[in-house]
Amino acid sequence: MVDEKYLELMHKEIDKSITPQEQSQLLLYLENNSEARSIHENLMRVSKMLELVDKVPAPPDLKDSVMRVVYSGEIRPEGRQNLLDRFRGLFQSSKGLRYALCATGGVLVGFLLFAMIPHASNRSNPTDKGNMIGTLFLNGLGNDLEEIDQKKIDTGDIHGLITTRFGFQVVIADLEISSPGPVELTLRYNPGDLGFSGFAQSKFQRQNLKTSDGYIEMTHQGSNRYVFAFNNNVNSVSFVDLQITGSSGSFTASLRSKK
């Protein structure tokens, strides 16, 4: 069973009105509740689908056509039938409007299906505290995001690559890292420019992910790929700073969030 309080926080996250404290509460709840994780992933997937749906403009004469129908004839049963016939004719004659309504109907059907089937989330890549932004990227659906910056990691026995990407008002920090021993990872950012919104990993590991206003901390060991997603809140360029500290050395890099 999912606490209604956290369902509300999921919707606040989608609306981008969630506070950092509420975000931390939600992430902790998702870590310990698989049913809530599944619902959260489905909601985020539908949210991204809605953002990607093309906005089809209404025909320029739509308002005039509807108003002519409304104000024509007397208010009687025959008139109401006439109104329906005229609106049907308007629908049939307007290709753009027809496509817009079909697209909207498809999205609504998809939303209902995802809401009714919470187990439809991707089980091949289980995520810890993850939302579907990072998961979709790991599954290869983030190819439309533009590569912004990239730094190679080669310090002692710590090796890897970190890349920032931007698209759809989302900033992605994509970290591939290999380290035989435990290392501490820290990401710092300006919370006024970026808002942490999601985390995913290619290999499931129980993480001690700690988030606060402006930084993310976690411990890593072995080989893995992590995706950190941020909402972009400004038009100017911001930076994501990575720091890795281990027994064999340390690494720091600053990467641009957009061009």
Image: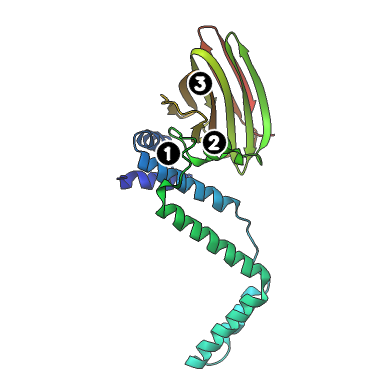
Type of amino acid under label 2: Phe
Looking at the image, residue 22 sits to the left or right of residue 52; the answer is left
Percent position (x, y) of residue 27?
Answer: 40, 35
**Mark 2 Cα shell of 10 Å, populated few (<14), some (14-19), many (≥20):** many
Nearer the observer, 205 or 228: 205
> How far apart are the two marked residues, 3 and 2, measured between alpha carbons?
15 Å
Q: Which mark is residue 230?
A: 2
Q: Nearer the viewer, mark 2 or mark 1?
A: 2
Looking at the image, do the residues carrying marks 3 and 2 touch, with CB atoms under 8 Å apart?
Answer: no
171 and 161: which is toward the camera: 161
Q: Secondary structure at mark 3?
A: strand
The picture places residue 90, in percent across and down from the top left corner, at 63, 78
Q: Earlier in the sequence, mark 2 or mark 1?
A: 1
Rendered view: 17 above or below 101: above
Mark 1 is on which residue type?
A: Thr
Query: What separation in Å lies between label 3 and label 1 (alpha carbons)?
Result: 21 Å
Which residue is nearer to you in this view: 236 or 94?
A: 94
Element type at marker 2?
strand
Quadrant holding the C terminus: top right
For the N terminus, the image quarter is top left
Residue 131 is labelled as none
Task: Mark 3 or mark 1: name the one nearer the start of the chain.
Answer: 1
Q: CA distance from mark 2 to mark 1?
A: 14 Å
Regarding mark 1 in the picture, which secondary structure is present there? loop
Identify residue type, mark 3: Thr
Q: Is residue 63 above or below residue 113?
A: below
> Reading the chain from its start, which is encountered first: label 3 or label 2?
3
Circle number at residue 186? 3
Measuring from the top left, give residue 200's x and y in whole percent: 50, 33
Q: Which residue is mark 1?
A: 19
State how many labels appear: 3
